[in-house]
Amino acid sequence: MPSGNPVSSVSEEFLKELEHYGPVTAIKVHKSLIIVGYGPILKIFNRDGNDELIFSQQIFKRNKIHSIAVNNDRIAIAGARSFAVLEPLKQGYAVQERAINEWIVAVEFLNNDTILVLTSHNEVLEIDIADCENFRMLSKYHCNEKSILYSGSIRVINDNVVYVSAGTVMDGVLIWDLRRKEILHNLRDHEGSIFGVKINASGKFIISCSDDRSVKLYSFDGTLLASGWGHGSRIWSLEFLSVSDQSVKIFSCGEDCAVRLWEYHGEHTLRQLMLFDHHHSGKHIWSGDVDTNSGIFVTGGADGKVRAEALKEEPTMTISLEEIAAQAEVDVLTKESIRSFGILNLPGITLVVTTKGRLFLHHENVGRWSRLSIDSLAEHEIAHYTLFKTVCELNAFIVCNNDGDMHVIGFDSKCQVYHVARKNPSPGPKKIINMLVSSSTGHGRVFVLLNSPILSEPMDLVTFVKTGDRLEPDLSQCLQKTDPRTFIPTSFHVDWKNHLVFVGSRHANFAVYEITPEQTLLPKVSKKLCNGDTITSLSLVDGEEGRSIVLVTLRDGFYILMETCIGHKLQSKIILKNKISRNIEGGFMKSNQLILYGFRSSCFYLWNETKQIEIAKDFCKGGHRHWEVSVHINPLQLHFSYLTQGCLRISTLESSWNSINQGLLVEGTHGREIRDVALHQESENSACCLFVSASEDARIKVGKLYKDGKMSYQWTMNNHISGLQRVAFLNGDFLASSAANEELLIWKLTRLRNEIVVINEVNRVQVAGEHPDLRVMDFASKETSSGFWIAAAYSNSIVKIFFFNKEDLQLQEKACIPYGSVCILNIHLLSFGTQDFVMTGTSDGNLTIWDLSSLIQCNLAPPHEPIVKQQVHQSGVKAVLPFFNEFGAYTVVTGGDDNSLISSQVSYESGKLELVTTAFVERAASATIVSISRAADNQVLVTSVDQIVRVWDTRLLSLNCICAKYTTVADTGCSDTTIIDGRRVGVVAGAGVSVFTWDDTKSFMSSF
């Protein structure tokens, strides 16, 4: 920080950081502890319990933690030029940050009283830390080769044998002996900078990674044993997972957000054992570590997530019909094969139906297959029942033939088999080609939907009711198809409380029926939800009397929440629609988190959409096969079974860590730079507020910010196709966002009963050309009784005015105002009674104001000539905040590329608008001021590229800095403020998010 700036550190104690989310720069797993360098903050989790956070403290004032070493109860950390030694679990232990004049690459304990510090000039400092108050330099070691290091590590074999691994910028890997100060090897097999190099605990092997995207394994004599290729970009971290006489296993992670596990068996190429792709969001897994004893690894990324995984194989079973028959002590019949199969979760039962109609049963408690015979159900009859469904919730299987005859094979509370038959009562012949099943566990009902390809035939809805421990057939009704030529049912769900039937079809067609006493039910709602593929599942996620919220999933990656309300007229509308880059076969809500499953490339996945993490996957080689899924929600477990090469394979997908947090220790944020944030206070006494962030990864995240600074995301929306620019609330029910490609989107918020807020795009600005190349730099809004006036600033120096109607959700362009030939960076709407104005801040340093009164009041075109155009900054006006002051005018605080902060007043008297500069601070920051937010009635929160957050007092039309504090958020670019339950809270974002609070009382001001 340049010393010339007088306001880089002012009364820092008044600006308190509540929480920080950002890149995870170091991780160390030690016994039952997971130690995380979260920027300058050290976090320690205890993995023996529920991954409890037992320690969290900012250790370094500004520098980030990049190296962690542990010895007994002492922890040494280092980053940039800072280092510290602490005993975090010792009560009353004071941590002191220390510094040297060199960049520190790595730190390691020689013994409990001595640490070794490797610097970027390939020197090692030996420091005595026995006295916690006074550290002493004991020795300085070098090998006469002072290459600039990008990475490195120190391996202590014993006090007399210490090896240094030095990863240079351009000269390969240097391995040298600390005590002898002698280079042992100069390994030059990599190309480019070395990003990681380690020696194993016994000193037998060396591993390294570099800019060339390879992992290399050496014997300690310098012989290259093998190379591993597979990472799509740079590799940042690697560790030895295990070393034995038979093999060497290696862990690596990097820029491609993938974790790969490698094994060496004597070949020249490392064999990839496991792949965890898309393990973090955005770009970069910066850090990772493993515990060889317990077989776990922990990673931290640029997205701020800390993820833990246990290295255990998913429980699987692959068995052929021959093996099943052998266990059941029968022979396989001629041309007999497995046709259908299903799994019941609670009894642990698997049922297989063969093409010859034989039933085979596997019970977990028995541990072997047996043949199931049902007296009233002949095997030759079952052979014609080609349709098969599993009802997990009520422990039953249902089979159906082409005539619509059904059999229920169920299990009671004692796991005893029962059988119920239901003959099709229709007098004429049937041709059933599809059977769908829905259950209502709370009401003890199972609903079966039968479909015929005959266009004139309606769908049959058959109800089974649980009587005692058995399902018995009940009602049977017909559902008229909306369009028999295109409406082919693929999924359905029944909300018995509201007597509604939801049916999904191919091509995203959707219908809603109301159950009435009539025999034939007509669709009350019929619509095409989107330009999508087959609707794969429907499930109820929230419901009350007269209202149902149904989750709709589509095979091509869409998921939708449909709200259906029963009133004078049954109405159904989309309240959330999003798309992910995976095929979706189904989904459900668990603890207010959306869980999805389906196929992605060659694997079947289980995905937490709310937390944006992949829970588990099975490499099944794609979805072009016969497969079934059984879902168990508590604990979360999914049984995925499919046929492969004539065999039945059953895979259990679940979190390798635990079912509570699924290995997500810290939730994190975006994986790329956050361009804007917006906060909205729900109510005065609410303990949280709505929080929306927009990132250059083209995503909008919607969640909640709590009084203590913690954040929890609920949705990650992918509607934009380019990096975001701005996001802001229009009011409590509407939101807008802008980006490149002329994208300006309007979103509607809907609140559900379970504290979930959902969001849906309801309109967007139509682009003029086929290839839009403009960026919507900023927008501002004014609410009226019927909608919003929205002013948008375009990068081609054009201001466009739109009106959005809240009732019909229509967005219309009303006016277009040219400015000149420079970029418009900011835009705001000002109102004085019935007079309305639009104000812009531009890259030429001007504030410009146009009169919009004729447009807003009378719908007449506004004049193109501005009424005020005044230069306030030397170059670009990067941040503008107008607010109404005690003088009946607007105070306008601006910051720019010239590092200055200016306060102006815009007043309107006697029909004349006037802009007057009232205060000017030339060196308000050491770099560009990028964001200004309202901190209090007479205070503003200002952020700048120099990573200083400042609070300025604006009373008496002046500017006085009353607080300035460094933030660890790099690329600081946006901010917003609100009040949560009486506490003032501010969010500062960029490459991460920090949440601050401050006191605006008189005692706070009196110190100045």
Image: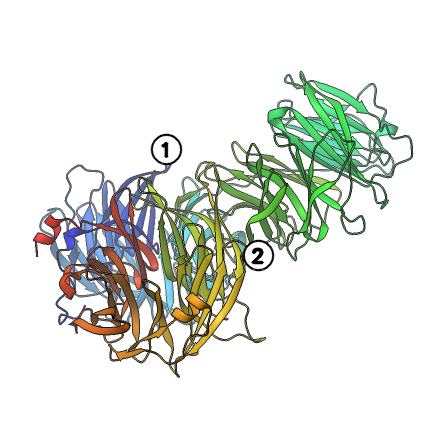
Q: Local crowd at mark 2 within 10 Å, few (<14), some, or many (≥20)?
A: few
Q: Position of residue 646 (x, y in %)?
A: 76, 43
Residue receiving disc 2? 581
Q: Residue furthest right?
A: 428
Q: Horizontally, is 905 left or right of 488 in the view?
A: left
Tell me the amino acid under the disc marked 2: Ser
Mark drawn on residue 49: 1
From this view, report whether residue 624 is shown above or below residue 970: above
Q: Residue furthest front?
A: 910
Instruction: Please report whichever mark, 1 or 2, sits nearer to the chain's N-terminal start.
Output: 1
Q: Local crowd at mark 1 within 10 Å, few (<14), some, or many (≥20)?
A: few
Q: Position of residue 539 (x, y in %)?
A: 61, 39
Residue at x-position 68% and y-position 50%: 527
Work out whether residue 448 can be spotted. Answer: yes
Work out whether residue 233 can be spotted. Answer: no
The foreground one among 481 and 917 is 917
Nearest to viewer (mark 1 / mark 2): 2
The foreground one among 114 and 351 is 351
Tell me the amino acid under the disc marked 1: Gly
From this view, report whether residue 738 is shown above or below residue 637: below
The image quadrant where one finds the C terminus is bottom left
Q: Horizontally, is 950 left or right of 357 in the view?
A: left
Q: Position of residue 153 (x, y in %)?
A: 31, 58
Does the residue at mark 1 contact the one at mark 2 (Cβ under 8 Å)? Answer: no
Mark drawn on residue 740: none
Q: Horizontally, is 349 left or right of 269 in the view?
A: right
The image quadrant where one finds the N terminus is bottom left
